[in-house]
Image: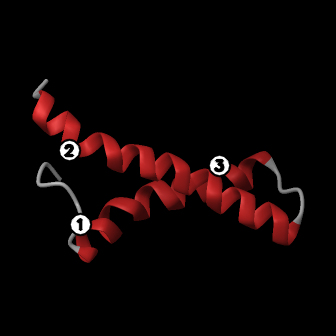
Amino acid sequence: MDTERLKEIAPHYIAMFVLVFLVLTVIEALVGDIGFWIELAIIMVVVVAYRPLVGRLGIGPSGW
């Protein structure tokens, strides 16, 4: 694996990980306890939406 590409992509995966926890925390604070399947669906939405959103904002890594 190209270490330069990894150095460029790693911060985005860390940001995505933090964003998932932030979104889940906010939703659970507003709504209360949500089920496992709803949490999984929210995680999938955040993960799938992250890459196109970052690309549209123009801050995505060149490897994407």
Say whether residue 3 is left or right of residue 49: left
53 over 44 or under it: above or below: below
Mark 3 secondary-structure assignment: helix
Q: Nearer the viewer, mark 1 or mark 3?
A: 1
Q: Nearer the viewer, mark 3 or mark 2?
A: 2
Residue at figure coordinates x 73%, y 58% from the top left: 25
Res. 41 visible in picture: no
Where is the N terminus found, in terms of image quarters?
A: top left
Q: Which residue is mark 2?
A: 8
Q: Which amino acid type corresponds to the residue marked 1 in the rendered image?
A: Ile
Say whether residue 2 is left or right of residue 43: left
Are the two marked residues, 1 and 3, in contact with CB atoms closer than 8 angstroms?
Answer: no
Q: Which residue is mark 3?
A: 40
Say whether residue 56 is left or right of residue 25: left
**Horizontal and vertical percent for residue 27?**
75, 66
- Which of the marked residues, 1 or 3, is nearer the chain's N terminus? 3
